[in-house]
Amino acid sequence: SDEMDVVPIVEGRVKSFLGIKRFEREGGGVGVMATIVIVDRTGEAKLVLWGEHSKIVEKGQLRKGDVVRVVKGYVKRGIFGDLELHVGKLGRVIINPPDAKLEDFPEVVEEVFPLSKLEPGMPDVTVEGEVVEVGPASIFERPNGSKGRMATARITDGTMSVRVVFWDEQSSRGAQLRVGDKVRLVSGYTREGMRGGVEVHMGRAGRIEVISRSEKSSMETYTPLSQLHPGMSSVNVLARVTAKTPVRTFTRPQDGKIGAVADLYLTDGTGWVRISLWDRHVNLLSKVNIGDLLRVKNAYTREDTFGLNLNAGRRATIDVNPPDVPKNTIPPVEECKVKLEDIKPYMANISLDVVVKHVGEAREFQRQDGTTSKMVTLLVEDETGEAPAVAWGEAAVKLENVPPKAKINIKGCYTRINAKGETEIHIGEGATIKIEK
């Protein structure tokens, strides 16, 4: 019937978790409910735990495969007309009662989802993969003022990689994973990531299983520069220096202290990236030459005014020409002289002999370190064609007053696609510019 029927005792094995939901009560206050699926030899049903009973899910006391005994639950029809078992104030839930006959309940078989099959909004997933990034645990403040903890990692199963977010109690376990560990994440759920795509989230109901442990706390695995994207942490790269910029100083807004930053441009044969060296790392600038091989560990990526940026902060380490890395691991840096008709998007360390056709008005902008810099747009040409260009920082200062028809030689520039879909030349502070008089 549609009326609530009280059932003295029901037993079942936990098959899956469908999530925890908080809601505003009609009379005021916040309510909470957790929904799971239980099975026996006759079939399966939803079990809805209200109020205090939901805490066994929220606190991770109930796991997939556990047997539960529900005392004085009641039956209701769900929104799709199927019968559900609910547990309210008068009911009880006993986890793995000692007198339960386990053979009466089917074993729960874990279905491992390929990462490529994940979609946002899946309430209960199990995935396997190899850890390729690990971030530290951090503390944040919730809207209600309480403190929470989280950590992030990235795993791959050979077809694709996904970001994993570990919440609260799971954060310390997630932060202890090592690059190279093979893991199984049980009873996670999926959400859409901040930059699109899908993420796996591990709450209290989840379980982290290390299938095989990496022998090293940080395996010598490196991310190709072509595979970098914003939001990555614990990034290791091997690349050669193609250009470097002067040191810039700035005042930190939080404490008024003076900080320092400098940029290097790197390439590894698959792509290129700009890396910002913060504070103590700027001392490397005097020791680094064009063509040197750098091993960077525990860097992170983000997007700024110039696009993708690799950052070497407090946790990062940088080795110059490490002796244990064969010299031929990364191809040597060679000057790549091209004509405008041959430029393609995302070329790095190219050299051009061009004529200035037009110089736009210089504009100021704020760097990520809070300092002010300049940019200027240009149109350049050679005997094969013309192309838009953008000069940044010191390069913009050098070129903002260049007259039309001036001949310039540029070394160490790179290309991108602009908002119009055109291949655009970018002249950074690491570029060398010669203006013919």
Image (cartoon, rainbow, N blue to C red):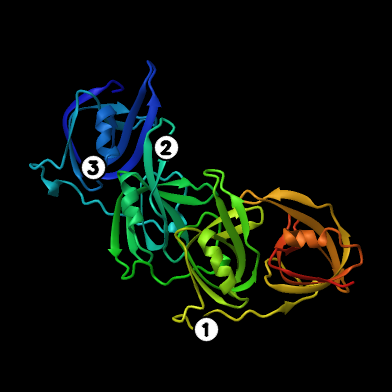
Q: Residue 327: which numbered mark, if any?
A: 1
**Few, some or many C-alpha atoms within 10 Å of disc 2 (few <14, some 14-19, many ≥20)?**
few
Q: What is the quadrant of the N terminus in the image?
A: top left
Q: Nearer the viewer, residue 286 or 20?
A: 286
| Residue ID at (45%, 56%) | 162
Q: Nearer the viewer, residue 363 or 383?
A: 363
Q: Distance between the residues labelled 1 and 2?
A: 47 Å
Which one is earlier in the sequence, the residue at label 2 or at label 3?
Answer: 3
Q: What percent of the width, then of the height, locates residue 38? A: 25, 41
Tell me the amino acid under the disc marked 2.
Answer: Glu
* Residue 12 versus residue 80 in the image, above or below: below
Q: Indicate the secondary structure of the residue bearing disc 3.
A: loop
Q: Indicate the secondary structure of the residue bearing disc 1.
A: helix
Query: Residue placed farthest to the top in the image?
Result: 27
**Residue labelled with disc 3:** 62
Tell me the amino acid under the disc marked 1.
Answer: Lys
* Residue 7 versus residue 159 in the image, above or below: above
**Few, some or many C-alpha atoms within 10 Å of disc 1 (few <14, some 14-19, many ≥20)?**
few
**Residue labelled with disc 2:** 141
